[in-house]
Image (cartoon, rainbow, N blue to C red):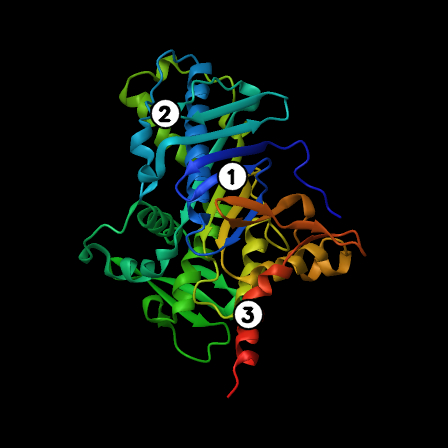
């Protein structure tokens, strides 16, 4: 077994009375966290709360970095209400409580709490400073190819999380010319046509001509933007550029650069990318879902020839799914971590990297278990076949 993430940062969250979430406690948010459950069970709501708390913690780290660098006046003022997008504000009620805690290898802990407002008046020590980047890939991403193709001719507001998804995709295709889509044996090409870029998909064997992305099948239109975004954050996203945009421009505009005496070099900060994905299986058949998960894990967890950038970034995936095929296939990738030859064929998942939860009645039920025969870690997927059994029971119960 390959054990990684030793001496790592650990996160926990406790949510009470937030929309459909009655009492949710996750003591260790793993690098791969998977949520499954009925429609409207709160999967997306949970991801959005985690994303919100991590964003606040990111800004706390930026403020601490500047304060520790000699700037007595904080450049960032967070208005909690301004962070509540796409229905999140309505889910916060008088009984809502959220507590998010980061446990650092140093032994120090940092907690952000939301109860009748936000409490984030914490100062992070230099040793514990980290730089977070989050990307929420919404289920409405099927509109992204058409939105990109039409550009400024499209008007309207599809919500905060859609526009975040689109902006991340836009930045990604600005850097690449070719995105492999191995799970469907195709690739996406980014071509300069006149003054603008256009997106095409073409089979690897070239058995037909390139097709514009927004004319491709629905499965390609939903999965290609997602895979492109993951590839971008795994390899192309620049933490240095992001830091300059968010911090140095402020220092220059405020004429405070002369006061800036950083005690920690930017390149020495721990760097984390957190990706939140709604329904990675959208419009994909069961077999392709499994192949897609292979490519997703290979990209995000740097398996095979995919090498981690020199800045040492770590990616985390949290996704919500309705697919029992995906969960059963994750068991294949888990088992592969126990066998050397299998781990060369599959983008394996280490047991300490994954947690899976079933959401029901406003709570989360852990689905990780130990196989009694092999003592391997597995995902308990037995109950996920209930619907097929119910359909079969209905079928056999019908008679003349």
Q: Which residue is mark 2?
A: 116
Q: Name the residue nearer the viewer: 157 or 111.
A: 111
SS of the residue under disc 3? helix
The residue drawn where x is 38% and y is 11% is 72
Q: Indicate whether 122 appears above or below 26.
A: above
**Viewer-closest of 222 and 18:** 18
Tag in front: 1 or 3: 3
Return the x and y of residue 294 as percentages of the image width and height: 58, 60
Disc 2 residue crowd, few under 14, some 14–19, many 20+, Cα 10 Å: few
Q: Earlier in the sequence, mark 2 or mark 1?
A: 1
Residue 239 in view in this figure? no
Distance of mark 2 from mark 1, alpha carbons? 18 Å
Residue matched to label 3: 390
- Looking at the image, residue 118 sits to the left or right of residue 204; the answer is left
Q: Earlier in the sequence, mark 1 or mark 3?
A: 1
* Depicted 247 relative to depicted 135: above or below: above
Judge the density around disc 1: few (<14), some (14-19), many (≥20) Cα neighbours within 10 Å.
Answer: some
Q: CA distance from mark 1 to mark 3?
A: 29 Å
Give SS at disc 2. Answer: loop
Q: Whole-Å distance between the Cαs marked 3 and 2?
A: 44 Å
Side of 59 relative to 365 (left or right)? left
Determine which of the numbered discs, if any, sits on residue 24 in the image: 1
């Amino acid at each position: 077994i390959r054990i990684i993430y030793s001496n790592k940062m650990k996160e926990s969250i406790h949510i009470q009375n937030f929309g459909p979430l009655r009492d949710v406690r996750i003591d260790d948010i793993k690098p791969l966290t998977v949520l499954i459950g009925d429609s409207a069970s709160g999967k997306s709501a949970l991801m959005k709360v985690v994303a919100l708390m991590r964003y606040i913690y990111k800004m706390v780290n930026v403020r601490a970095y500047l304060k520790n660098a000699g700037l007595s006046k904080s450049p960032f003022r967070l208005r909690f209400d301004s962070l509540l997008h796409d229905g999140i504000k309505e889910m916060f009620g008088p009984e809502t409580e959220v507590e998010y805690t980061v446990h650092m290898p140093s032994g120090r802990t940092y907690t952000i709490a939301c109860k009748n407002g936000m409490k984030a008046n914490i100062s992070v020590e230099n040793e514990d400073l980290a730089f977070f980047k989050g990307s929420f890939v919404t289920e409405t991403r099927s509109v992204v190819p058409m939105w990109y193709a039409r550009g400024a001719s499209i008007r309207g507001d599809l919500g905060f999380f859609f526009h975040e998804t689109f902006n991340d995709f836009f930045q990604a295709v600005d850097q690449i010319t070719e995105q492999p889509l191995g799970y469907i044996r195709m690739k996406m090409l980014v071509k300069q046509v006149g003054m603008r870029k256009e997106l095409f998909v073409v089979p690897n064997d070239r058995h037909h001509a390139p097709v514009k992305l927004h004319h491709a099948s629905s499965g390609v239109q939903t999965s290609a933007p997602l895979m492109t975004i993951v590839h971008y954050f795994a390899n192309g996203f620049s933490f240095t550029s992001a830091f300059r945009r968010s911090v140095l421009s402020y220092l220059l505009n405020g004429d405070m650069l002369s006061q800036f005496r950083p005690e920690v070099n930017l390149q020495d900060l721990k760097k984390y990318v957190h990706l939140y994905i709604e329904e990675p299986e959208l419009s994909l058949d069961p077999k392709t879902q499994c192949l897609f998960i292979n490519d997703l894990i290979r990209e995000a967890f740097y398996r095979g020839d995919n090498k981690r950038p020199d800045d040492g970034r770590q990616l985390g995936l949290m996704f919500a799914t309705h697919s029992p095929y995906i969960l059963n296939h994750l068991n294949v990738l888990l088992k592969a971590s126990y066998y050397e030859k299998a781990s060369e064929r599959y983008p394996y998942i280490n047991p300490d990297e994954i947690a899976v939860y079933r959401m029901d009645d406003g709570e989360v039920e852990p689905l990780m278990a130990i196989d009694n025969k092999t003592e391997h870690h597995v995902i308990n997927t037995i109950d996920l076949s209930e619907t097929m059994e119910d359909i079969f029971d209905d079928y056999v119960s019908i008679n003349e």
